[in-house]
């Protein structure tokens, strides 16, 4: 088998690779000439389909286009603005990391698990991170513009005022957080960790609800108070209460559901461990997805603010903002988006802790093997129908 | 177990080819010649049949020197039973079959697939 064909066959997933090798090896049994060529040509069609080569190529193309767009937005900039160097750092570090992480995850955690939940989660994470990077590259020059620093009030501190060391530290932390998010989601959706598709759906679903609520409260950066100028006070209070409940209750509930739903064919001890793993994964996703969503959507909103009169009108309905007032609000929001980093940093930790705790508690109440609740001492299970009575067909 | 109407005409052709000598291991090229299927069609069918436990596959123990090992295929016991049933159903009068089956049978007939035991 030629080196090229061996390489192509290697693209085929494990369970199908034998078949691709068999097809290719069989070609050597055919008489040389057109028959062998036709066999291989038809075989290439099979291998391309099995190796999902077209999907891989489409993914690589979409990533390349997004990366090129980010470079186009992030790379140019005035030399006096620290944001130029920050954006260039993002480009030269984050984009290669995002390109390499799937390969690293495949090596360490195995190939992607089958099923749509994992695929949607991976695509969603990459879309959110690329959108966040693009929007951040667009917002940074506004937030870090030295000429704008005197305009900012004291509670919207600018990284420029705090010095370049602070800027580089926060940027390095941002890059690290984003890389950890992507790596965690790639690992959770890989085969080796055996996170069930239902766990991904439950965890990510809770995270989406949290993300929507957080975005409703903090669409223009994160502060102690809501940054949504449209909401009346009572709605803000309600949403903030709901956000707190979702932050702590969401991971606990999602983890409990994920642990209860898990079914396996392993030993009872292994099933217990896997249940707690499902719970921790659901807890992490219930907060990480929300945090990533609000950071990406909020940063994109702030990035669009100076470019879209429609958006400005939607956020400040009925107000006739002067150019100076609009610029001041854009500038303040641009500085506040850095505070989304706090959400990105702490929320998944809360989700992981709540998920592990809820998972351990749920697992404690389940029998080791079948996943049904343990009855209190002294109670007997409800008797089933006698053996000779057939249940009606439903 | 799947009914014969669930098998496409091409799958029935592969089942018929394997069913001619159920105990014999067959290789892909022989099956392709017998059924007239291209490799890119034959192998996905073999994979689906193997996934359903109807076909078993193994690598040749003693390859011909200078040539790569070959993959061999034959029906399992369940596969032989399913093939018998499916091919018998395909032999029944076309009027009794569903429209989908009729088109499948016409395609099979056009390919000249031998019924089990016909050879």
Image (cartoon, rainbow, N blue to C red):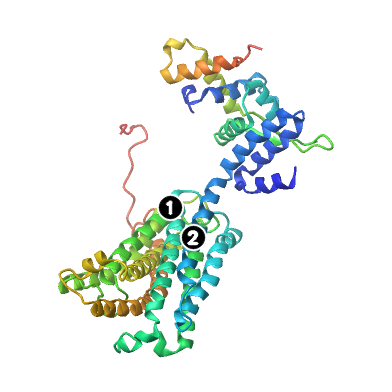
The answer to whether one can see residue A360 in this image is no
Residue B119 vs B71, above or below: the answer is above
Q: Is residue A155 above or below residue A292?
A: below
Q: Position of residue A219 (x, y in %)?
A: 29, 70
The crowd level at tag 1 (other Cα within 10 Å; few <14, some 14-19, many 20+) is some
Nearer-N-terminus badge (1/2): 1
User: Residue A160: where, in percent of width, then height?
Assistant: 41, 87
| Residue B75 occupies quadrant | top right
Chain of the residue displaying label 1:
A
Question: Residue A21's image quarter?
Answer: top right
Helix, strand or loop at mark 1: helix
Q: Residue A377 versus residue A184: which sits nearer the camera?
A: A184
Q: Where, quadrant-wise, is the N terminus of chain A in this rendering? A: top right
Using the numbered discs, state the Cα–Cα distance from disc 1 to disc 2 in whole angstroms: 11 Å
Whether residue A247 is visible, yes or no, is yes
Where residue A336 sits: x, y (%)? 33, 78
Nearer the observer, A200 or A82 = A82
The C terminus of chain A lies in quadrant:
top left
* Residues at discs 1 and 2 in contact (Cβ within 8 Å): no
- Please name the residue shown 55% across and 34% down the image: B48
Specify the subunit that label 2 lies on.
A
Q: Secondary structure at mark 2?
A: helix
Which residue lies under the disc numbered 1?
A117
Crowd rating for badge 2 (residues with CA inside 10 Å; few <14, some 14–19, many 20+): many
Q: State the residue at coordinates (69%, 38%).
A: A24
Q: Which mark is residue A188?
A: 2
Of all residues, the one furthest to the right in this rendering is B65
Q: Nearer the viewer, residue A220 or A81?
A: A81
For this view, does A83 lie left or right of residue A28?
Answer: left
């Amino acid at each position: 088998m030629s080196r090229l064909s061996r390489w192509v066959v290697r693209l085929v997933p494990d369970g199908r690779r034998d078949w691709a090798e068999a097809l290719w090896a069989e070609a050597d049994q055919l008489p040389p000439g057109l028959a062998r060529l036709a066999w291989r040509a038809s075989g290439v069609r099979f291998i391309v389909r099995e190796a999902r080569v077209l999907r891989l190529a489409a993914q690589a193309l979409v990533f390349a286009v997004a990366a090129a767009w980010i470079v186009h937005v992030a790379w140019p900039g005035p030399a006096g603005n620290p944001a130029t160097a920050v954006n260039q750092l993002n480009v030269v570090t984050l984009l290669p990391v995002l390109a390499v992480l799937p390969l690293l995850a495949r090596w360490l955690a195995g190939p992607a698990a089958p099923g749509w939940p994992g695929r949607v989660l991976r695509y969603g994470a990459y879309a959110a991170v690329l959108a966040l990077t693009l929007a951040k590259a667009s917002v940074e020059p506004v937030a870090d513009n030295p000429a704008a620093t005197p305009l900012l009030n004291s509670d919207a501190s600018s990284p420029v005022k705090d010095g370049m060391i602070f800027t580089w530290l926060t940027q390095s932390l941002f890059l690290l957080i984003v890389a950890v998010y992507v790596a965690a989601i790639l690992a959770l959706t890989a085969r080796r960790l055996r996170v069930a598709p239902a766990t991904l759906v439950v965890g990510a679903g809770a995270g989406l609800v949290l993300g929507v609520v957080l975005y409703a409260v903090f669409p223009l950066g994160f502060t102690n108070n809501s940054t949504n100028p449209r909401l009346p006070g009572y709605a803000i209070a309600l949403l903030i209460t709901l956000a707190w409940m979702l932050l702590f209750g969401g991971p606990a509930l999602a983890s409990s559901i994920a642990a209860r739903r898990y079914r396996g064919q392993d030993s009872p001890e292994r099933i217990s461990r896997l249940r707690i793993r499902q719970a921790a994964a659901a807890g992490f996703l219930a907060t990480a997805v929300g945090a990533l969503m609000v950071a990406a959507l909020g940063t994109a909103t702030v990035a669009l603010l100076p470019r879209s009169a429609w958006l400005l009108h939607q956020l400040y309905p009925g107000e006739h903002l002067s150019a100076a007032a609009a610029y001041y609000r854009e500038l303040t929001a641009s500085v506040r988006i850095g505070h989304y980093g706090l959400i990105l940093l702490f929320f998944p930790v809360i989700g992981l802790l709540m998920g592990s705790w809820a998972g351990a508690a749920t697992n404690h109440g389940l029998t080791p093997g079948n996943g049904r609740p343990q009855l209190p001492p002294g109670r007997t299970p409800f008797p089933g129908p006698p053996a000779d009575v057939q249940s009606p067909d439903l | 177990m799947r009914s014969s109407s669930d098998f496409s005409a091409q799958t029935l052709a592969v089942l018929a080819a394997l069913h001619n000598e159920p105990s014999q291991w067959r290789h892909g090229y022989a099956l392709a010649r017998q059924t007239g299927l291209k490799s890119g069609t034959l192998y996905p069918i073999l994979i689906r049949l193997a996934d359903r436990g109807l076909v078993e596959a193994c690598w040749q123990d003693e390859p011909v020197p200078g040539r790569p090992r070959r993959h061999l295929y034959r029906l399992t016991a369940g596969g032989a039973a399913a093939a018998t049933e499916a091919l018998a159903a395909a032999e029944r009068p076309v009027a009794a079959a569903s429209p989908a089956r009729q088109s499948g049978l016409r395609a099979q007939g056009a390919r000249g697939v031998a019924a089990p035991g016909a050879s």
